Every structure is written in structure tokens, then in C-alpha cells.
Amino acid sequence: MSVVIVGTVAFDKIETPFGKTDKILGGAATYISLAASQFANDIKLVSVVGGDFPQENIELFHQHSIDTEGLQIRPEGKSFFWWGKYHIDMNSRDTLSTELNVLADFDPLLPPSYQSPDFLMLGNLTPSVQMRVLDQLVRRPKLIVMDTMNYWMDTAWDDLMKVIARVDVLTINDAEARQLTGEYALVKAAQKILNMGPKFLVIKKGEHGALLFNKTQVFFAPALPLEEVFDPTGAGDTFAGGFIGHLAHTHDISFDSMKSAIIYGSAMASFAVEKFGTEGLMNLSDKLINERLQLFVDLVQFDISLVNS
Amino acid sequence: MSVVIVGTVAFDKIETPFGKTDKILGGAATYISLAASQFANDIKLVSVVGGDFPQENIELFHQHSIDTEGLQIRPEGKSFFWWGKYHIDMNSRDTLSTELNVLADFDPLLPPSYQSPDFLMLGNLTPSVQMRVLDQLVRRPKLIVMDTMNYWMDTAWDDLMKVIARVDVLTINDAEARQLTGEYALVKAAQKILNMGPKFLVIKKGEHGALLFNKTQVFFAPALPLEEVFDPTGAGDTFAGGFIGHLAHTHDISFDSMKSAIIYGSAMASFAVEKFGTEGLMNLSDKLINERLQLFVDLVQFDISLVNS
């Protein structure tokens, strides 16, 4: 099944308590498509980069069977750049620099072969850009997954609500779910969000795991307790990539399938944070992934005998 | 199996965004023993109250088959009193008043019938008082569980370390695990704590669930996502009570049994926070508890097919 992934492809410069990088490959669509490519084999990337984007990065996408026809290259421009520094607890970070560059006037043009995907992942971007993608589809995908962030709640509320109304799955973090609804209890926030349009909601809680809701069910997946979180950059996007990649591989968008997909996404995210940038997603074998999935099974499985029965 | 529970029996005055109470029954040993009494039937309470403690509260313990021979009544004194106010997020609170009263010079004397329990739960108390209990045992219990808090890390470090060295299970929250070890990653903190003496460690993360560690295994139990958290007072103690009550009922202190016990504890805590004070622990039927346990099964169970296998 084809998966179109829309989002940023960028350079990141990252500082953590464990070290720092020069400009390395980053961006939401990069993490999403690399993670999804472990499970799905017809991935099409929509993004924009500048003339400074090295051919070897494009070849990296091709090595992962990621189609880059929808990756616009603007030779006269520079790629989107983000420079951030993580605090000692790794849960918070300061942005030291953001240069939008070619992203500032990004118009996501879908090549004809991209206009009827089976699955669509809208990575975190300006809601109006996400909407532009939806407006170019010639038939509705089997599933549309959308990521967003608090910044768009502050600056583009009306556009954001229009996009949210048109997607099947929304992925946001717990603080964003609260901001979007004014509800502190996540169970209540979830029901309000599901009334905005999406049929499913994934609430990401970082080191505290993730929750999946539909109108009648809830599922909780833990994050793996790790000895070291080396670099959290891209963890949420990698999660989303593993999630949609697994769904596209199985063609199954039931609640039960989404539960598995969340475990797959969590497993991929656990690899991502163990190394800088996208390095943790390179050279992953089925064996390594299966071992990691088994850790999740071991982490949460229990046999319970009910009281007096 | 007999379970001796040591801790505070108190009056609490509680304010939450949803309402407030006058002085009501509270205290760590109260919540622990009420929760444990759902599963274990030979519970012996060690605590101290003043002449202001009403007979109806003592009868409440008896109705739950809790032996109060070890509950000292000091007619001339007043019971321990805590007055707290929760913030809007229910995760933080201000203490408006603490009156130690009869707790100030509490000497926990174990009646002869209390001196060889099968299970011992040391609720959060001054470490030297917890030690006094250990020193009166005529044989080592099958399992000693200890709760403590950051306050004793700040004020009674040496005593605390001596008690920790003598127990089997330590229960603390995530911030306390970090403070106790200087390690941010909970996996690392856990291993350091297990080197201090305990064979098992439970790290409570409130609305984010709980982790169980031994030297080679880890288990994660979520908290139930609730529509309303009405009053978090006693949630951790109720959790501990369900935990040790289930272990005492099954006589099984294996890692697998502790996994179930954590789910039992989490279920009991979810009842406690739905109402003010101990009210949520009154009139719980096996049916209600089993339905709640099933919610935990539904919340985390998933079937996963490994990659390409």
C-alpha cells in the first residue's frame, strides 16, 4: 500500500548533555519516512530542501525505498535548519536558532503518482500547507494521520481546526491535548477531540508512553524504560512513522491493529533516542526489531486471577 | 497469612477543585489496611491516635477485620492532623497545616501476637520508628514492604539507609528514586536502589502508572485514565495496601505475583481517588473489583505479530 508522507526535511544541530552534532539530517518527514520504511515499501516523500542538501541524503532515502519525486529541490535556497539544546533531564529543550529558509513559502505539490495514496501522513507543518495537500487528493485515502503542535494552536487556530476535521487519526502530546480542549483529564480531552472529526486520537506522553482513544475504547502503551536517552530529537516523528508503516503493511485500520501499530511506533522511537539524529534508525534488522517488540510484551504482560473466581 | 501494617492513623482536612471536607479519617496505615483488607483477612494495625479519635472509626477497622490491638489510644492527646489543598492539576498540593500531636513521640509497641507476622508493611514514617518495629520482630517475615518519602532523605538519611537495607520491597515515587540515587534514568536509579538492600523496587508515577524492578526484570503498570480524579489523598497508600494484600492472599512473592499485585494495587488506588478520603474504599464488592481489574487488562493487552515471522 502506498504511503505519502508530508513534512519537513531539514538540517538539525543538536546539543545534549551527552554531546553535540554539526548540521545533520533531520526533519519530521525524514524520521517518519525512515521509520515507516522498515515496514511499508511504497513510501512517497513530500517536502522541500535547498541547494545545500547533499545528494547522499537523497540516496539515503532511495536506499530505504523512499520515493523522492515529491521532494522539491530549490537550488537557489537553503534547507530548513533547527538548532536546539536539551536540558539535563532531556524532557525540555531550548531552540537556539530556527531558519525557515525554503520552508517559508513551501507549496507542497503532489506529483500525479502521489495523488491517490492508500495512507497519508501529514507531519507537523503549517495547517494551511497540510490543507493544500488534502486539496490535491483525487480520492480519499484509507487513512489520514496528522501530527501538529501547540504553536499552531496559538497562531493558526481556524486553519488547524479545518484540517483536524478532515483527518482520521490525530497525534499530539498530553499538554497539546489539554490546550486544544481546555480539559485537564485526558479522558475528557480525548472525547472532545474525537468530536472535532478524527476517529482515533493518539496522545504521546514521551517517557510516560502513549494513549490511543476512539469513542468507546482506550489503550495504553508504555515507553520502554531506557538506560540512556541519548537524543530525543525525532522521537515523536519516528513513533508516527512506525505507527503508519505498520498499518500500511497490514492494511488493517481496526482499533486492535492500531494497538499493535502503537507498539511498533514505540519500538522504533526507542531505537531513535539511543543515538544522535537518525543514526538509531540505520541498519535495523527484523531480528533487532522483533527483540525490541518482545521487550514491550515482557514489560506489560501479566496474568491476573480475578478475586474469588 | 498475617499482615502487620504500621503507619499513621490521622485526621485529614482536604480541599480540591471539586470540594472540601471537614476533618475526616485519613493516614497512611488507614488507607493501607482498608485496601489490604479487601484481599487479606488477618490484618493487624500499628499506630497511635488521641482521645479525639471516635469509636466509630475503630469500629470501621473492625468491620474490615482489621485487628486494632496495636493501635495505641492516648486519651490525653490529639490525633495527627493534616490539612492540604490540591492545585487545579491535582498533581501538586500545598500543606496548610500539619499537627503531629500524639505522633510526635510515637513508640510503636508490637503486642506479642504482632511480633511474627508473615507480611510486614512499613508505611511512611520516621525511619527510626520503622526501625523500632523491625527490632521487635521475633522472626523475619516472608516479606517486608517499606514506603518512605523525600522528607526523610533530607532529614534522616543515615537512619533511612539502615531501614532500606533491611526490607524486601521499597515503594517510592519517581522524583524520590532520582533523589535517592542522583540518577535521572529510572532504570539506573532502580539498579542503584536494589544494591542498597531491597530485592524489589516499586516506582510510583501517579497518573503515569508504576514500575516494578528486580535486578533482571522490569514491569510497567499503567494508571487507569479516569474521567475525574476527585481526591488523590491516600492513592499511594491504597496502592501499597492492595499490593501487599494481594501478596498475602496468594502467599506468592515471585516477580510474576508482584506484577499481579501491582495491578491490584492500581485498581484499588483508582477507586480511592474517585471519592473524598477513604469513601472510595467503602462497600467495594468482588464484582466491582473484578470489573476494574478487567479494565486494566483491556487497557494494556495487545497481540503483536513480529516482523516477517
Image (cartoon, coloured by chain):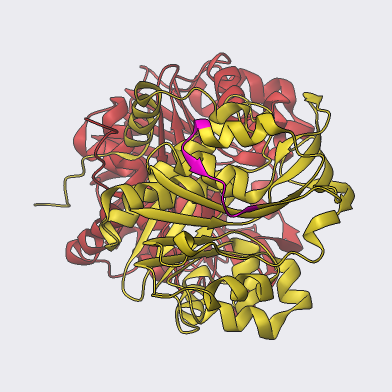
Chain colours: A yellow, B red
Q: In this view, does A218 lie to the left or right of B205?
A: left
Q: Quadrant of residue B10?
A: bottom right
Q: In this view, does B65 lie to the left or right of A36?
A: left
**Is residue B219 inside the magenta stretch?**
no
Which residue sits at x=63%, y=65%?
A148
Which residue sits at x=21%, y=44%?
A304
The image shows residue B101, relative to residue A160, as above or below, that is above
x, y (%) of residue A49? 74, 49
The image shows residue B232, relative to residue B35, as above or below, that is below
Question: Between residues A54 and A233, which one lies in front from this camera angle?
Answer: A54
The image shows residue A309, relative to residue A192, as above or below, that is above
Question: Between residues A205 and B26, which one lies in front from this camera angle?
Answer: A205
**Is residue A64 inside the magenta stretch?**
yes
Question: Between residues B173 and A7, which one lies in front from this camera angle?
Answer: A7
What range is drawn magenta here? A63-71
x, y (%) of residue A107? 70, 67
Which residue sits at x=35%, y=26%?
A286
Can the viewer see residue A1? yes
Q: Quadrant of residue B267?
A: bottom left
Q: Is residue B201 left or right of residue B111?
A: right
Can the viewer see residue B70? no
x, y (%) of residue A203? 52, 61
Given the current orientation, which residue lies at the most extreme left position?
A309
